[in-house]
Amino acid sequence: METDLLNTLVTEAIWRAEELEALGIRPASSAWEDVSRIEEQLAKALPVSEAQGRIARRGAVDAALKAGDYDRAQALTDGYLADEAAPASLKAALREILEEADQEIASHFQHAAKHHTPREARDLARRFNEAGAFGLAA
Amino acid sequence: METVAFYSYKGGVGRSLLLAYAARYLAAILGKRVVALDFDFEAPGLHYKLKFDITSDPHLLAGGGGSVPYLLATTQGFAFPPPLEEHMVYLGHEDKGGWLRLMPAGPAPRQPYWAVLKKLGDKLRLGDSSGQGFMALLDLQARIGDELKPDYLLIDARTGVTELGGLATTILADTVVCMLVANMESLQGTLAVIDALKSAPRLANQKPVRIVPVLSRTTTETHTAGFVQLARDRLHEKDLTPSELPHDDLAVLEKLGFLWPLSQAYIELFQRLFPSAIASGQSTPRKNL
């Protein structure tokens, strides 16, 4: 019953996010965050041995990236990869989603990517969020 | 390419002016290829210091050129950014084989500039967990290096403790010129920033940042009051020796608006800042007024 409701919600949420994105409306990122959170609930409700459970796990990570929340995508991926019951195909797919996101950033910032990796930039962003400009707020 | 960021904790210390003189000295006297980049987005004025009239460039004047429009273009969608040259102005100085290019922030203080800056504020988020905000700025620096191949990139970093000032000094710069004046407010703020610069993480392929403190606008009064000595002592505690730029020298240069003649204080500072350029460039004896 719960998964039926979640499936309905996630279907609506995906439709909403896609339509917002197609219309170029800014809050599309928050719509994708909704998708990611519903997918996460589905992933909790469905075992990884089921195809729907694996789809939900991939969907949670993918939607987090579409929401621009790389930290969340990474945290979800780390959790799913740590699940011993997760099949190798799912683990490979999750890693691939993150790698594709990196490649997209690297292809857009080709000059920076010759010298620095998106991971380095993310580390800087994380530190910036924690400690502010110059690290003075740490 | 060596990147030198000019930073000051407080405004009014002659930071942009020093950058402008350094840029012209490197290009005109030493024959180096120099890009001057205005990162002081909230109060841009490097084009004034380099004597460039924004109104002479219709593209810039309409808000289509400069570092702010460039960064906005790179952060809007994934289209490849427009040619760098559309966002720069060429300032010549080819006599000795060098050149000077300026990337102004934009046509400040005109309305189109502030409109573009507002848009950029919504788009360029350094805290974006994807790292795209940092990548956009690193990409601009790397692109300047790849396409223009300058010897020096001189960045006018924002005064105070700001996101861009922090980035320009802790991440983009090989050398940070930390300018201060001889009063407690300026000194204590600068010392805090110097501590932060020393402990700031660097990217994998970067050396530790070189910090060059510059005590500017010193006068007989500030010497007599002991502020200059106090600043020296406090900086020595951090293993740093300040260069000193007397107020009169700066004032005279500002009034004349010419690169030449430079006072001995400037020449000594530039020798300290750009030792490899001095070694490879033509050594020029000082001319007198």
Image (spheres, rainbow, N blue to C red):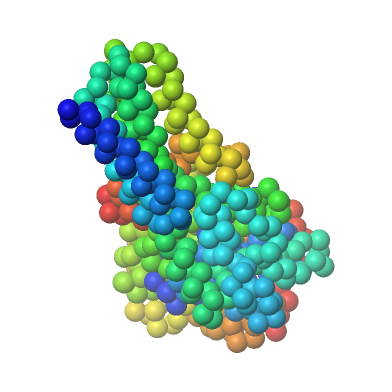
Q: Is residue B208 above or below residue A52?
A: below
List the single residue furthest toward the bottom. B255
From this view, report whether residue A11 is shown above or below residue B126.
Answer: above
- Residue B16: percent from the left, percent from the top? 54, 72
Name the residue nearer the viewer: B84 or B243.
Answer: B84
Q: Residue at x 44, y 19 (%)?
A: A92
Left/right placement of residue B283 relative to residue B66 reads right
Q: Vertical placement of B86 versus A77: above or below? A: below
Residue B224: x %, y % from top left: 38, 80
Nearest the eye: B54 or A49: A49
Q: Position of residue B58 (x, y in %)?
A: 68, 77
- Residue at x-position 54% and y-position 35%: A103
Q: Quadrant of the C terminus of chain B?
A: bottom right
- Answer left or right for B289 relative to B107: right
Q: Quadrant of residue B221?
A: bottom left
B255 is higher (above) or lower (below) than B91: below
Q: Residue at x 62, y 54 (%)?
A: B81
Q: Which residue is drawn at the image coordinates 36% and 70% (left, top)?
A: B186
